[in-house]
Structure formats: structure tokens, C-alpha cells
Amino acid sequence: MNCRIASIQVGLPQTHGHPGAIDPMQKSWFSGIFKNPVDGPVEVGPVNLAGDGQADLTVHGGPDKAILGYAAAHYPTWQKELGLEDFPAGAFGENLTIEGATEGEVCVGDIWSIGETVQVQVSQPRSPCHKLGRKWKMPELPKRVLATGRSGWYFRVLQTGVIEAGCAMTLQERLNPEWTIERVNRVRYGKEASDNEIAALADLPELAASWREAFQAKRVRV
């Protein structure tokens, strides 16, 4: 399975909005969700791309969420649904906009090579927070992302190096072909998940720790 990085985006946390604004969408807030495209080589570190950062490290960033990927194929659909002509790559705060793969084709645990040395592993689906809605002044957008399953996914970094837009991504190893990002989303957020599915994800070693814990808690409840 071969894919391509259509574009790379990075951005550091900044303050947005206006202090004292009455409209909740206009009030002051701090976030790293605004990403800008990068031309040329980008260093891939253990927990970040060079020039990238997150505001709230209790829920964002870290080894299991070092790089956020999003399917380029979703952009035409979102533009049509949201009625936005200006909706460029990086609109979802992703670092890598990827051609050739979607949530139905990417699996937790997949190991991908990028460029000459970089290796990354799919760790979990992306669970969008309220800041995505604030960015686009659409409070309902995070729920729409989950409802459509067009969530994106995170990578952990197995080997650092340098990448750039246009680099090929090659699937090196598929450890869990049964656990696509699409299916993991369905089990976590859907209403028809089986006990066996919940138990399997609670014990899936390649799944990010926070998601395993969520499934462990869900297993206890059921």
C-alpha cells in the first residue's frame, strides 16, 4: 500500500479571539490547531514535527499523538457539505494531509516508512475537541466529524528523520488488519459494539494507552 504526503502543516499554540467578547465563539482562547503549510524539509522528532506544538498537553501531543494525519480524499466532500470554498489542507489541524488512504484502509498498528529514514506507526483515531469547532465557528463540527467517521488518525514516531511534502508513504507492516480506524471509531462511539470487540481493543498493545483505558472502562461497565 503506497500513499503520498500531499502537504505538511505545523503551528505553535497562539491566543485567538478577543478578550471581553460576548459571542462565545469570539472570546479569547489558546490553541495550536491553526497550522500553516511548510515547503521543504521538516524534521520529525520523537513527539513532534519541528515547528509544531500543542496547547493542552494533558489531552494533546505526547508519544502516542506525535503526528496527526488526515485523508486528502475527504476535503471535496467537506467543502460541499460545509459550503466553504476556502477550506485548504490543514483545515482540521492535521500535520500530514495524505493522499491514497482513508479511515477504512488504515489500521491501528500499521507501520509506515516516509522518505529515507522516518518510520511511524498508527496509534489511534483522532477524537476532535471543541477547538475544531471554534476554529471554524461551527460548534457542531466535532460531532459531525465523529458522526461521519472522517476523523483522521495519529502516528507515533518509531524512527526520526526528515520528510517533506510529496514524499511517498509505504506500508511496511500491518499488525492488526481487522482493526481499521473506521472500525475502532465504530466500537468506541457506536451503539452496537460487541463485548468481544471492546475486550479486544482494551488489550490491543498497538492502540494508544488512553484509548485502551477507555475500552477497559467500557468493558467493566458492560
Image (cartoon, grey):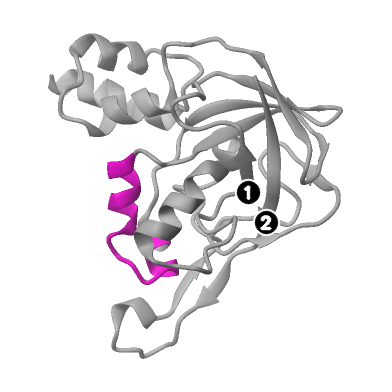
Does residue 71 appear anywhere in the picture? Answer: no
Residue at figure coordinates x 67%, y 55% from the top left: 9
Whether 199 is drawn above or below 130: the answer is above
Quarter holding the C terminus? Answer: top left
Q: Residue 137 — which label?
A: none
Q: Quadrant of residue 218?
A: top left
Q: Residues within 10 Å of mark 2 (few under 14, many from 20)?
A: many
Quarter holding the N terminus? Answer: top right
Q: Is residue 87 left or right of residue 21?
A: right
In the rendered structure, does residue 109 fall within the stretch colored magenta? Answer: no
Does residue 55 appear anywhere in the picture? Answer: yes
Whether 146 is drawn above or below 115: the answer is below
- Which residue is the site of mark 1? 95
Q: Is residue 185 left or right of residue 179?
A: left
Magenta residues, dominant SS class: helix
Q: Is residue 50 left or right of residue 122?
A: right
- Image coordinates of residue 102 in percent, x first then y, are 50, 33
Three-letter amino acid code at disc 1?
Answer: Asn
Residue at figure coordinates x 34%, y 31% from the top left: 185
Residue at figure coordinates x 46%, y 48% from the top left: 58
Q: Which residues are magenta?
A: 132-148
- Image coordinates of residue 63 in percent, x first then y, are 60, 35
Alpha carbons under labels 2 and 1: distance apart: 6 Å
- Image coordinates of residue 209 in percent, x first then y, are 45, 27
- Which residue is the site of mark 2? 10
- Asked whether the beta carbons under mark 2 and mark 1 sit within 8 Å of each other, the answer is yes
SS category of the residue bearing label 2: strand
- Please tell me which residue lies in front, 220 or 40: 40
Q: Quadrant of residue 29?
A: bottom left
SS category of the residue bearing label 1: loop
Q: Quadrant of residue 36?
A: bottom right
